[in-house]
Image: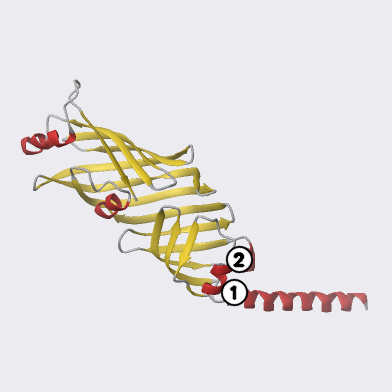
Amino acid sequence: MRTKLLIIALCLSAFFLFVIFGAISSLPADIAVSHMSLPKSVKITGATGTVQNGFAERVRSGAFSVSNVSWSSGGLIDLLRGRAHISVDDPKLISASADLTAAPNLLVLEHLTGTGTVDRIVKYIGLAKMPVQFTGNVDLKFPYVAFQNGKCDRVAGRIMLSELTGKVQGQVFDLGAGEFKFECRKGNIEAKVLISSEMYTINGNFTVTSKGATLFRGSLTPNQELEPELRMGLSLFGKENKDGSYSFTVRDHF
């Protein structure tokens, strides 16, 4: 008798869990978003679909924002833990995907990968004032990114640049390839930057604060193969240093 009662209780529990999960997963996304315990810095607008499979016109976290964000959750456990797989198809920035974990004071992205173009990224991160107009391809690979209370807590990843070209004084030049290697420091996002080709090398440090301020400090060192037309444009970076390099600083804001 007890065995039968136990089986009935288990079946009823499973049934109620199924009903509850069905109700939660089919809850309209706009209603769910208005009641979600997201980090204070995260704002979601234009949400449609359901909690389990939805879409948002824009997601903002502090100074950073992306558009055309979709998400899908694997089941009840994922929903309860604030986990989902997200995809971004922002025509002004990147196409990317990642596994998301969200809590009131924590936002974690894992297995973040994406592609974009250099001109869009340069404009987005506030480096459009540089004296060189860049074009090229961008590939993102971040195994782990975490923000605690809206500030960078931990990051492991890099951005690779390929097929770089630069336009200086109306002329286009092949600029090789580059890499941004990221870390967190005092709540800010920082990156070591290396861009090089047969003609030149750029070394520098790039910083993004939690408020969206950007700063790039670096130097450009021309090589012997640098074309005369491009060498003439180096004065745009400032005065030449004793070692033949040109130091420059670019400040901006998202």
Residue 232 in the image: above or below residue 85 = above
Which disc is residue 25 wearing? 1
- Label 1 crowding class (10 Å Cα cut-off): few <14, some 14-19, many 20+? some
- Which residue shows up at 6% across the image and 35% down it? 228
Give the residue type at disc 1.
Ser
- Disc 1 is placed on an element classified as helix
Give the residue type at disc 2.
Leu
Residue 19 falls left or right of residue 132:
right
The Cα–Cα distance between marks 2 and 1, rounded to whole angstroms, is 8 Å
Residue lying furthest right: 1
Q: Quadrant of the N terminus?
A: bottom right
Q: Position of residue 108 (x, y in %)?
A: 52, 52
- Label 2 crowding class (10 Å Cα cut-off): few <14, some 14-19, many 20+? some
- Which residue shows up at 48% across the image and 48% down it? 145
Q: Position of residue 17 (x, y in %)?
A: 71, 74
Q: Position of residue 167 (x, y in %)?
A: 14, 47
- Disc 2 is placed on an element classified as helix
Which disc is residue 79 wearing? 2
Which disc is residue 78 wearing? none
Residue 15 in the image: above or below residue 127 = below
* Applied colour scheme: secondary structure
Q: Nearest the camera: 42 or 141?
A: 42
Label tally: 2
The numbered mark, 2 or 1, whose residue comes first in the sequence reads: 1
- Which residue shows up at 46% across the image and 58% down it? 98
Residue 218 falls left or right of residue 63:
left
Q: Nearest the camera: 174 or 233?
A: 233
> Which image quarter: residue 181?
top left
Q: Position of residue 31 (x, y in %)?
A: 55, 74
Labelled pair 2, 1 in contact (Cβ < 8 Å): yes
Residue 169 falls left or right of residue 214:
left
